[in-house]
Image (tube, helix red, strand yellow):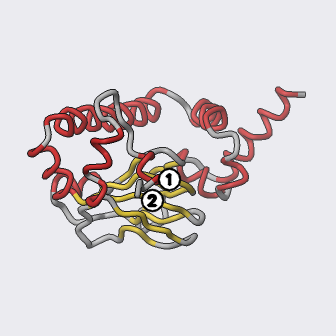
């Protein structure tokens, strides 16, 4: 029986359906509830996740929002998975979510035993680096208003899915500043 949820695994121009099907016993579907914690500080998370449905985010102990991931994206505690450090952040569900997970050990097994998975892994890591570069470049080059506009462009539904306080925290500004940015956008539309 084909596990349809494995369609979330990006093929990256390398994998075919049968490559994923052969590895299907190494991937697991998890159904998670809103506010459920996936990763906690002080633990060692060794899983990479692919978000099938829902919305997840990372935040510090102080509740500072680090990032959000939407359907179709992958996520992990990078330091824990790739550098074997204890997690220093929470990763939790902003709404009911479904994720497909694979352990780092199982992924490395695929990489060592199958050339296609080795090439896929290199491309997958490149994609992660590109996303991180884009995120940090935006933090350095763009002001909060520009980042907010881009966020709304990419994910217009975000206002309905995420509390404004979280969006402000993600942008690194106060909720008052976010209100001003939003008011300025409304004025420009009129």
In the image, 127 versus 164, the foreground residue is 127
Residue furthest to the left: 112
Image coordinates for residue 44, horizontal then vertical, percent: 23, 68
What residue is rendered at 63% in x and 40% in y?
155
User: How many marks are shown on the rendered structure?
Assistant: 2
Image coordinates for residue 58, horizontal then vertical, percent: 44, 58
- Left or right relative to 121: residue 163: right
Label 1 crowding class (10 Å Cα cut-off): few <14, some 14-19, many 20+? many
- Left or right relative to 45: residue 62: right
What residue is rendered at 63% in x and 34% in y?
145
- Circle 2 is placed at which residue position? 99
On screen, 183 above or below 70?
A: above
In the image, 73 versus 118, the foreground residue is 118
Residue furthest to the front: 1
In the image, 93 versus 135, the foreground residue is 93
Per the model, the C-alpha gap separating discs 1 and 2 is: 5 Å
Image quarter hosting the N terminus: bottom left
Q: For residue 144, what is the image quadrant?
A: top right
Image coordinates for residue 14, horizontal then vertical, percent: 28, 30
- Circle 1 is placed at which residue position? 52
What residue is rendered at 55% in x and 32% in y?
143
As helix, strand or loop, the secondary structure at mark 2 comes to strand
N-terminal of the pair, mark 1 or mark 2, is 1
Label 2 crowding class (10 Å Cα cut-off): few <14, some 14-19, many 20+? many
Image coordinates for residue 131, horizontal then vertical, percent: 39, 35
Image quarter hosting the C terminus: top right
On screen, 142 above or below 61?
A: above
On screen, 117 above or below 101?
A: above
Asked if marks 1 and 2 touch (Cβ < 8 Å), the reply is yes
The dot on residue 135 is none
What residue is rendered at 40% in x and 68% in y?
38
């Amino acid at each position: 029986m084909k596990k349809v949820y494995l369609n979330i695994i990006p093929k990256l121009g390398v994998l075919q359906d049968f490559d994923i099907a052969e590895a299907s016993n190494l991937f697991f579907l998890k159904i998670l509830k809103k506010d459920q914690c996936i990763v906690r500080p002080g633990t060692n998370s060794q899983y990479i996740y692919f978000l099938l449905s829902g919305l997840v985010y990372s935040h510090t102990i102080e509740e500072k929002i680090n990032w959000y991931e939407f359907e179709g994206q992958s996520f992990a505690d990078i330091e824990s998975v790739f550098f074997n450090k204890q997690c220093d952040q929470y990763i939790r569900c902003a709404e009911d979510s479904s994720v497909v997970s694979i352990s780092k050990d199982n992924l490395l097994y695929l990489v060592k035993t199958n050339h296609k998975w080795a090439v896929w892994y290199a491309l997958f890591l490149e994609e992660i680096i590109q996303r991180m570069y884009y995120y940090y470049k935006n933090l350095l080059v763009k002001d909060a208003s520009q980042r907010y506009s881009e966020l709304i462009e990419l994910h217009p539904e975000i206002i309905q899915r995420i509390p404004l306080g979280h969006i402000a925290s993600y942008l690194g500004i106060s909720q008052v500043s976010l209100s001003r940015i939003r008011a300025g956008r409304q004025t420009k539309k009129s």
